[in-house]
Image (spheres, grey):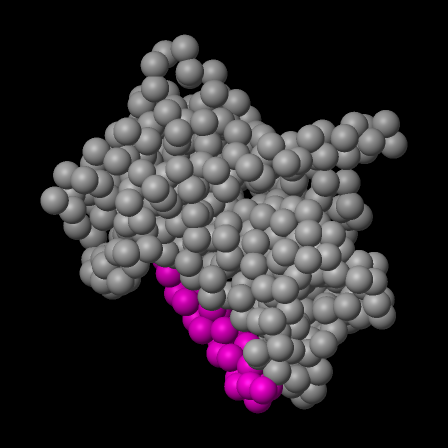
Amino acid sequence: METVSNAVTWLNGIVWGPMMLVLILGTGFFLMIGLRLMPLIRLGYGFRMLWGGRQAAGDGDISPFNALMTSLSATIGTGNIAGVATALALGGPGALFWMWCTALVGMATKYSEAVCAVRFREVDEDGNHVGGPMYYIKNGLKRHWAWLGTAFAIFGALAGFGIGNTVQANSVADALYSNFDVDHWVTGIAMAALAALVLIGGIRRIAEVAGKLVPLMAILYVGGGLFILAVNLDAIPHAFNLIFEHAFTPVAAGGGFAGATVWAAIRFGVARGVFSNEAGLGSAPIAHAAATTNSPVRQGTIAMLGTFIDTLVVCTITGLVILVSGLWNSGATGAALSTAAFSQALPDFGAYVVTFGLSVFAFTTLLGWSFYGEKCVEYLFGIKSITPFRVLWIIAIPCGAVAQLDFIWLLADALNALMALPNLLALILLSPVVFKLTREYFS
């Protein structure tokens, strides 16, 4: 087992090395320039389309609004609470700056993913609309690229059981045990039962649940964070000063902080940013392909809001709360650091805000990723594989809740990078289609 762990560690170092970070940021920057900064200029237009997208308007299975909520259900999760804290604990305050950079160019990436997903989607044997990187690779590129779609589906199906299932269940179980002394196995069984009730209804039930839970929980969590920042208003300028200063200069060791180089800030900022908003990963377009719309561009403008909301809003609030608390260099990391920061500012219920937020966010992530994994498996083996997949997915939840997942975290990180590679290559090759559709729509 140690040999396997060392091999995955070696692979992780390669796939999340400088070339991957350059590819993620470079692809987003290339798409943003090719789109002539449209995702930034048309941000208000995207919110108008989101508001109008509460009702179905075209072919598809779920409303454009619920497609975004399903996508957000899979992205707003442990990355926004534990991931941000980990980035700050390992890369210093400057990591938040690089998370912002990832999100800004990631809006163009997420937009392009959704445009391609709707443009090249299919209807399966059950009459459901299916799409995502595997389909826009198969239908948008020449036949000799088809193996890339298969590779994405394999990596996506496997990654789902890690980052989208067992890791989420384990995070919730740890949080409930630490704060309420709830046994891990009780949490695992309860989450499995709740997930089973939702998964029986497929994408429509998942989207319905996500459409209600995600906005409610995001408002509560963001509201709690904004209240803390309002109380500590005088500390916010210093927090921003730390972010911009240490984005380009190393952080010296101090307190429980081991110190961080500029490269560490970039690496952990970009990696945790991608982990949080999944721009370039190729997962979100699987949900947007099911939207009831006849316009790939309109759905793309809604999709790009996912990156804005996830990183530039939710992650920023988490990061600022940690920085104004002064605990970022205490030596704590992950959800424990976020909990400590919220508890310091809100002694009576700060820990409950983080615990409840983490639990709901992780549960909705588990639901969103179940759909992603299901569509990857369907692409590989057909619709008959859906029921066995759902059974395995539910069984994996209590297993993840009680397991030690250090290796699974490592493997999931590597699989996420392997998902991104074929997707980013496909987006670059299909960029002329995205640019053409965008010009025609807005002209």
Q: At x 80% / y 58%, what residue is drawn? A: 259
Task: Say which of 39 and 183 sits in front.
Answer: 39
Task: Say which of 147 and 379 sits in front.
Answer: 147
Q: Residue 326: x and y, percent?
A: 72, 76
Span shown in magenta: 205-234
**Displayed quadrant of residue 293:** top left
> In the rendered image, which quarter contains the C terminus?
top left
Residue 260 part of the magenta segment: no
Residue 227 part of the magenta segment: yes
Q: How many marks?
A: 0
Task: Say which of 200 and 2 sits in front.
Answer: 2
**255 relative position to 58: left or right:** right
Q: Residue 113: x and y, percent?
A: 37, 39
Is any part of residue 270 visible from this angle? yes
**Displayed quadrant of residue 14:** top right
Q: At x 70% / y 60%, what residue is drawn? A: 92
